[in-house]
Image (cartoon, rainbow, N blue to C red):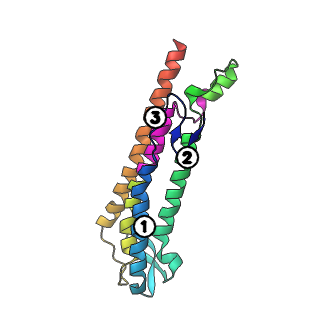
């Protein structure tokens, strides 16, 4: 099976591309970058280096490297999610593997981390890209604290919820896709055993 950029040539796969789901992540990354560039000249000489439960508890001198840390981290996260989505779409699904006569080879295929089907691989790739966009929202309050115009250690309590809720929301599509894939694998095993 040959796949390229989310399009599969196999009969079973849904051939709709998934890459349009990168638009929210790339838009957010661009917005964070523009916001950071606009705020950088007005930042104080010291900017937050670490934020703990009591607010900012470590400071560092203003530099592009530290000031744009939220942008760099989100760019890296986006790149990793895209690589994972590409790998998932390019992996031969379990239902397209040749039937193995050796019981050890069958066991190895059953225990592999392959998607159950091409549709399951697509769902996983979609979940990765949607999850990345949702997790990206968590970088907005982080950037807000990083790019404040005044040097203050106070961080409002709601800021932590504003980070944790999108992170949890970003994990939810991944959990749902994984559970659906597991159920699909279980049905396939039960169908072979019957």
Does residue 144 appear in this view?
yes
Query: Is tag 3's residue or tag 2's residue first in the polypeptide sequence?
Result: 3
Give me the residue at 47% from left, 68% from top.
71
Task: Please state the horizontal and vertical placement of residue 144, each as a whole percent of the image.
Answer: 36, 72
Residue 170 vertical placement versus 150 (above, below)? above
Q: Which mark is residue 14?
A: 3
Instruction: Write down the residue under mark 1.
Output: 30
Residue 60 belongs to the span the image colors magenta? no
Residue 114 vertical placement versus 190 (above, below)? below
Residue 155 vertical placement versus 184 (above, below)? below
Q: Quadrant of residue 103?
A: top right
Give me the residue at 51% from left, 82% from top.
63
Instruction: Write down the residue under mark 2.
Output: 86
Count of marks placed on residues: 3
Mark 1 surroundings: few (<14), some (14-19) or many (≥20) residues within 10 A: some
* Disc number lying in front (3 or 1): 3
* Cα distance in 3D space between marks 3 and 1: 30 Å
Which type of secondary structure does the marked residue at label 2 adopt? helix
Task: Please state the horizontal and vertical placement of residue 125, each as a whole percent of the image.
Answer: 48, 44
Mark 2 surroundings: few (<14), some (14-19) or many (≥20) residues within 10 A: some
Residue span colored magenta: 110-130
Query: Is tag 1's residue or tag 2's residue first in the polypeptide sequence?
Result: 1
Mark 3 surroundings: few (<14), some (14-19) or many (≥20) residues within 10 A: some
Does residue 52 appear in this view?
no
**96 or 48: nearer the viewer:** 96
Which type of secondary structure does the marked residue at label 3 adopt? loop
Q: Which mark is residue 111?
A: none
């Amino acid at each position: 099976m040959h796949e390229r950029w989310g399009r599969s040539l196999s009969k079973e796969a849904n051939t709709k591309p998934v890459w349009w789901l990168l638009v929210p992540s790339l838009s957010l990354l661009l917005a964070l970058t523009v916001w950071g560039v606009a705020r950088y000249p007005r930042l104080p000489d010291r900017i937050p280096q670490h934020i703990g439960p009591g607010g900012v508890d470590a400071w560092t001198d203003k530099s592009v490297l530290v000031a744009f840390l939220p942008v760099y981290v989100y760019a890296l996260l986006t790149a990793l999610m895209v690589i994972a989505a590409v790998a998932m779409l390019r992996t031969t699904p379990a239902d397209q593997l040749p039937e193995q006569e050796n019981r050890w080879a069958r066991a190895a295929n059953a225990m592999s981390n392959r998607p159950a089907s091409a549709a399951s691989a697509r769902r996983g790739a979609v979940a990765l890209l949607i999850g990345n966009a949702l997790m990206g929202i968590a970088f907005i309050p982080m950037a807000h604290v990083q790019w404040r115009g005044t040097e203050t250690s106070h961080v409002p309590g709601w800021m932590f919820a504003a980070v944790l809720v999108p992170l949890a929301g970003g994990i939810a599509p991944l959990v749902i896709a994984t559970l659906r894939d597991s159920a699909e694998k279980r049905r396939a095993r039960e169908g072979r055993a019957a």
